[in-house]
Image: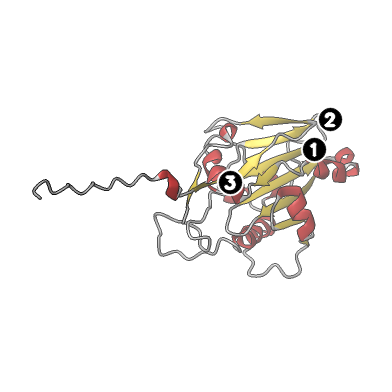
Amino acid sequence: MGGFSQKTENINQSFGLNSYTLSLNQIKYKQPANFNYIRRELGNEEYLKCIFADPAAIYQGYWHKIISKDKNFVAIIDIPPVWSKDSVHIFMELVPESKIKINTYHLSHIKADFGSNIGKGIDSLEGFPIKYKSSKYAHEAFNADTVITYPLKMWQKYEDQYNHCQVVVIQKNTRGLVCLYCFYNDKGKRKLNRYLKSLEGMFWYRDPKDYIEVIEPPKSDSIIHIIPRKKKNLIQ
């Protein structure tokens, strides 16, 4: 029987601290065409007050974004620091008894988005404007299982010029997720489908064959067995 060993290569070094999460989840980043990548330094992250009903409740900062070269579309990249050891639950070293399921965590993330956006907690996504892309699209665009999109209300313009927001959540079972907070102005709205098309393949969930190394046992004919020869009886 052969063995298996996961390669621990760092596949997204440009993402700083987030590259560790991407590598654990075997998600690879590819710079989309016609976009510029911008990375903020630690301690200089930005906060998305524009989509929070109560700006004082903001606690998460963002370090990475891409902006279209025509400056009409921006996507803030959110990489939640979650991964699974057993392919069932999120690994939480400080709270090992936690049993948060990795395959449905993205739904909790979406609930939190809508809760922050309207200013109150929610228990169900029923009635909220979420749209599931087809599984065929999810697989072909990101090698994922699920892609969900939804709009968020803009309480103020992002960077004083972007007045629309749509979120793209990308998820694969047993792995973590990636969220893109897309902001665009009225000009960008007219080309929204073109921008979203450009994001396809930006994040890609690698197949096991790309990062699992098979360790085969040695072939039987490569093992040399040394058997001591019997001594002749010299006394006749």
What mark, if any, has residue 70 been given in the picture?
2
**Residue 222 x, y percent position in the rendering:** 42, 44
Task: State if disc 2 and disc 1 touch (CB < 8 Å).
Answer: yes
- Label 3, on which residue? 26
Mark found first going from the N terminus, 3 or 1: 3
| Helix, strand or loop at mark 3 | loop
What mark, if any, has residue 109 been given in the picture?
none
Check disc 1 and give the amino acid type: Phe
Q: Badge 3, how many Cα within 10 Å: few under 14, some, many 20+?
A: many
**Residue 164 x, y percent position in the rendering:** 80, 46
- Label 1, on which residue? 73
Decide: is 99 above or below 136. below
Q: Badge 1, how many Cα within 10 Å: few under 14, some, many 20+?
A: many
Decide: is 168 above or below 102. above
Q: Which residue occupies 55% across, 43% down?
A: 23
| Helix, strand or loop at mark 1 | strand
Residue found farthest to the front? 236
Residue 152 seen in the current view: no
Disc 3/disc 1 C-alpha distance (Å): 27 Å
Residue found farthest to the right? 190
Check disc 2 and give the amino acid type: Asp
Q: Badge 2, how many Cα within 10 Å: few under 14, some, many 20+?
A: few
**Residue 68 x, y percent position in the rendering:** 79, 33
Q: Which residue occupies 51% across, 56% down?
A: 84
Disc 1/disc 2 C-alpha distance (Å): 8 Å
Residue 80 seen in the current view: yes
Residue found farthest to the left? 235
Give the camera-side residue of 74 and 79.
Answer: 79
Check disc 3 and give the amino acid type: Gln
